[in-house]
Amino acid sequence: MNDTVRQFRDFFVSLRLTVVLLALSMILVFAATLDQVNLGIWAVQEKYFHSLFVLWRIPGTAIPLPVFPGGYLIGGFLLVNLVAAHVYRFKLTWRKSGIFLTHAGLILLLVGELLSGLWQEEFQLQLREGETKTYAESYRYNELAIIDTTDPQFDDVVVIPETLLADSTPIQHPKLPFRVVTKEYYPNAALRLRAGTGENPSLATAGIGPQITATPLPLTYKQDERNWPAAFVELAGPEGSLGIWLVSPQLQAPQTFDYGGRTWRIGMRPQRAYKPFSLTLLKTTHDVYLGTDIPKNFASRLRLTTPDGRDDREVLIYMNNPLRYAGLTFYQYQMDGEHAMSVLQVVRNPSWRLPYISCAMITLGLIVQFCIHLSGFIGKRRASAAYPPARP
Amino acid sequence: MKRYFPLLLLLLGLALIGRSLLPLRNPAAFDVVGFSRLPVLMNGRVKPMDTVARTSLLVLCNNVSNDPANSDPERSHRIATPDNRLLTPNEWFLDLMFDATKADTYQVIVIDNPDVLSLFHLQPADGLGERRYSFAQIQKALPELERQAKLAEPVESQARNAFQRSVVQLQSNVILYLRLKESVVASDRADFLGDLMDFQQSLPAGIEAVRAKEAKQPHDAVAARKLIDFGERFDRMAQLGYVLAIPPAAGESDANGWRNAGAALMETFQTGAVNAHVMAYAGLAHTWRAGRPDEFNEIIRLYREELQKGFPGALAKCDAETRYNNVRPFYTAKILYVLAFFGALCSWLYWPKELGRGAFWLVALAWLLTTAGILTRMWLEGRPPVTNLYSAALFVGWVSVAFCLGLEYLYRNGIGSAAAGLIGFSTLLIASYLELGGDTLEMMRAVLDSNFWLSTHVLTVTAGYGATFLAGFLALIYIVRGVFTQSLDKATADTLARMVYGIVCFATLFSLVGTVLGGIWADQSWGRFWGWDPKENGALIIVIWNAIILHARWGGLVKQRGLMCLAVFGNIVTSWSFFGVNLLGVGLHNYGFVEATFWWLLAFVASQLAFIGIANLPLARWRSFQTR
């Protein structure tokens, strides 16, 4: 083994590297926690943890400068360091078994966290009592839906993710007889009815748009608020523009138009994830402690049905008691008792079991190690009288 | 003499506890104690009047025990009246509910902000201890307060300035005060019992008159008017009344049956008979006002007998809670910890064996007392020990002291006792500040309503906090003894290093397992194992810090002094996780927001950094090492 390789190896198996990485991760977590006040929990995760470097934009420019290693970098190095140190120093002895098990558990935990960062999808399912839905909605991403409603039997839907709209490159879809061109896109906007004639004319020429003004707002990062995008979208056929529509998830009423002998509906909505089953909200329960506003219990009773009829049963979801079904987990998230409305959090996380396994490994490992130390300590105290009980 | 010293200390401690256990005595002829044990429902649980009186007073007066004018702990829980009597919280509460015009002259409402004070055209000199004012003093300007509160309320609570915070706080205290007054009798009526008798008598005729009036038939206008007046008064009481003092009908176990007197009186229009419990309270009010203790005591006795039939369990719990409130185990434990701390300090200089043993016994006594206190709270609440910030502070102290007792038992060098005294006292002190928020036996929010996770995740993680603090305090002892005294010999230094190392191992075990368990709970209730929520991050930072200490030591990166510095820094990390994240005001775990905490936290961090600085003085400056 030559010197370079040996240095390389020594670097990656050293405890010094472990300590430095741990210290860096502590600073990272601390800074990220403080920054949540400004950025909110989602942006902080992207900026600090799901990144190789924490970037800082030089004020007044758009040039990003890496100022600190990000979560993926530190986590990756820690993983390499852990694995390398164990491969290099691995000796199966009883004295080390606890430490070994603990670190194996930690490796699994880090890997699990990486996987859920990559795989996890979160959606929400908002239901009123009596309502049935076959899809969950994203609470962060939106999509433009253009629906051919000519056939009363079914809808033919083309959806365009918000990110493509934001690019403002013209979009041509084989199912659509027109191109979709974004004229203007606001990531967050306030809509209100046009007051009178005094204002600048709207960019929109069709649908409800001309009666509404859209004012761009700065992005919000608050946990209890969401961004409501708005876009002015032009549909252009071979013979020219069909008109410009204002679309936003805030505009609930459908905007329809006829083109090429077919009837179309256009609108922006929270991104949907369709499921191979449907959920009907039967009953919501919202208890508070008497004489307080402190919620005691939220519960939703639902009916779960699949089109093939193999599943048709009632389920109860309440706090700390989610429903796990078809690789998804449904949690009671929010509830509006007054309007008999319930919001469920729908999560797909294929690696959700890993933390449970690693938790068991870590606990077991630490307890084993602790018992080994304790028996050693007691043995030593018995053997030596170095620190006898204080004598008079 | 010297031989009996430990015994003497133990007897002193036992005497202190014994004194707090003395049976309750009535301050005068009225059976105030009997009244204080009556069950009511508030904030979601059945509790004695005593707890309501104490917590309401604590909220209104805040800092009772830190009032410079009232430094004596016994006096501090008394209210001074204009005619120079001292009232117990329960006597004050009786006056407030039964004789409001008198209670309005007692100076109990705290106003600290000078700008808020000027809304009322008051000077600090007008107040008791320059900060407490009577309701009568502020009554006139209440509309202005309400206007200011309306202006301040739309501002987010973190963005409010001192004036706005103070206005909002005062407005909510005034509302509490007004609502307490209307709980069982109408505060503006001179003879409510007479009113009720009158109401009962005129009810049949009144109902007939109202029915006739509604049917547009000839009717007795006076009788109808009278009944409507009663209805309006009772409805106001039902809207305002804060204390749900009227129990459900006997045999009905549903807690939702508890209501205030106004609501119970409104039922009369259906039932035709005034609720007997309301009558009993009106009778109490009548006799209390008229100064007729014999009748008052008789009503209490009869009322309790009546309750004994339907609610024996609630009565027993309320009696126990009243007892617990009066014993104040944590207050006595605080004194014992101080004594133990100084005993242990002195043991390093004189009489190491006797003083050391005495201090150990005092710590053991105080620890048993806090154990009893925590167990009582658990029984009252039916919950694992940690449910909010207050109980977490208690538990952190309890765990740390338990570790200290173990250390002291093994090493017998006074270090465990000194650390126990210091940590026991500081955690109880912090707890007594957290108590100012109101009743500390709170209900659990829906998501936290899980005894399984409360007793696994919360307990392990809190034990981890406690162990990390303990390691830090042991390191402080090392630094202070080493730098400022000559008492840190090689053997003691090595022992301390071993103690710190051992405790850090414990801390790693508990905080790591506790944090991972917390992740699993989060996965169960929110759908993600880890969400980078501030409180989660706080726990993670503690885990990382403990891991750093251990790895730095294993790697030989730090020696004894370095280990001590790292352990002291652990204090900063832990206090930030415990309090700091609550100050951020974001995140799901944010259940206890304490503002003044911020400055205390800063001061604490500065002091710990100073200790780390001192520890880094060259060895020649350490008095313990100069001598050798």
Image: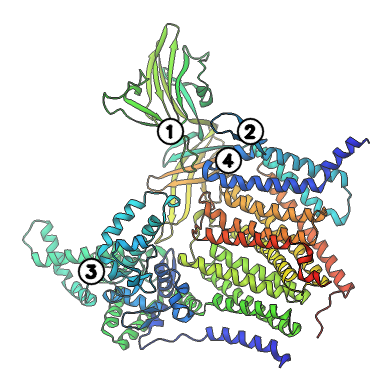
- Please state which of the two labelled residues, at mark 2 or mark 3, is closer to the viewer: 2
- In the image, residue A104 above or below residue B133: above
Q: Residue at x 80, y 48 (%)?
A: A16
On screen, residue B371 versus residue B291, left or right, reads: right
Which residue corresponds to mark 3?
Answer: B272
Which residue corresponds to mark 2?
Answer: A65
Q: CA distance from mark 2 to mark 4?
A: 17 Å
Instruction: Please tell me the numbered disc located at residue A44.
Output: 4
Same chain shared by disc 1 and disc 2: yes
Instruction: Please tell me the numbered disc located at residue A1.
Output: none
Which residue corresponds to mark 1?
Answer: A217
Decide which of B60, B438 is in the foreground and name it: B60
- In the image, residue B23 above or below residue B570: below
Q: What type is the residue that disc 3 sits on? A: Gly
Looking at the image, can residue A376 be seen? yes
Q: CA distance from mark 2 to mark 3?
A: 79 Å
Please identify the quadrant where the N terminus of chain B is shown: bottom right
